[in-house]
Amino acid sequence: MKILKARRAVTVVEFAIILPAMLTLICGTIEIAHMILARQVLEGAVVEAARKATASLETTELRRNQIMRDSIASSMGLFPMASGRQLQIVTTVYASFSLAYPETYTDVNRNGVYDIGEPYVDRNKNGQWDNATPKTGTLGGPGDVVSYTVNFPKRLLFAYVGRFIGYSSGVIPMKATTVVRNEAVVRKGA
C-alpha cells in the first residue's frame, strides 16, 4: 500500500513539472496556427476590399476608405484587434505599374542599396533618387495604379505565449498589400 501511494505521489509531481511546458506547447501551437490563418484571411480581405473600393471612380476618397475598413473588419471579425490600436490603410498612387519600381542607379560600392552620391536615372526629373515614383493624392484617376497596404494589429489569444514566439507586447503586427488599377474611364450618368 505504501508503494502504491509513493507511485501516485511521484506521478503527481511529474505531472506538475510537465504541465506548464505542455500547456505552453499546446497554446503556442494554437496561437501560431491562428496567426497563419489570420494572415491568409487578411490577404484575401485586402484584395476583396480594394476591389470593392475601386469599383467606381465616382466613389469619393472618404467613401473608399470606409468601404475598405468595413470590408476588412467584416472579414477579420474572428481575429481580435489589439485594444487601443486601429486598422491603418496606406494608399499610394502610381501612373502605371512601371512607375511603382525604384529609379535605376549604379551601385558604386556594391552594397545593394542606393547611397547619396551614386549616379541614377532621374525618371521624374525631380532632382533626387526615388525609391518609386508615386503621384500625389490617394484616390488616383482613370487608369492609375493604386497600392493599398493595410496594417492590422492582431491581439494574441494567449498573451503569455507572446514572449516565447517574439511578441511580448501581446500584439502581432500584420501587414498585407495589394495593387489594383482604377477603371480606365469614368462613366457619365451611370
Image (tube, helix red, strand yellow):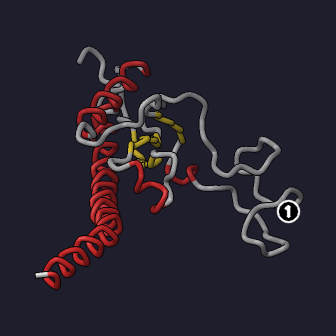
Q: Residue furthest front?
A: 2
Residue for point 35% across, 68% down? 21
Residue at which label 1 appears:
118
**Residue type of the residue flagged with mark 1:** Glu
Please say if 77 is above or below 41.
above
Residue closest to the eye, 187 or 76: 76
Residue 182, quarter of picture: top left
What residue is shown at x 77% (from left), y 61% (from top)? Answer: 114
Picture coordinates of residue 11 (x, y %)? 22, 76
Q: Is 6 drawn above or below residue 139 in the view shown?
A: below
Toward the viewer: 133 or 157?
157
Up/down of 147 relative to 65, above or below: below
Quarter location, residue 7:
bottom left
Q: In this view, does 143 lie to the left or right of 80?
A: right
Instruction: Mark 1: give few (<14), some (14-19) or many (20+) Cα within 10 Å.
Output: few
**Of the pair 116 and 123, the residue shown nearer to us:** 116
Please give the name of the residue rendered at 69% of the width and 56% of the height, measured from the top-left corner. 103
Per the image, label 1 sits on a secondary structure element best described as loop
Q: In which quarter of the image is the C terminus?
A: top left
- Report the quarter where the N terminus lies: bottom left
Q: Which residue is drawn at 31% across and 72% down?
A: 18
Q: Where is residue 77 in the image (x, y as percent from the top left)?
A: 24, 36
Please state which of residues 44 and 64 is positioned toward the viewer in this rendering. 44
On screen, residue 72 versus residue 129, left or right, reads left
Left-right relation of 65 to 189: right
- Where residue 164 appears, x then y in whole percent? 46, 62
Name the residue furthest left: 1
Q: In this view, does 181 lie above or below 188?
A: below
Residue 73, position as x, y percentages in the image: 29, 33
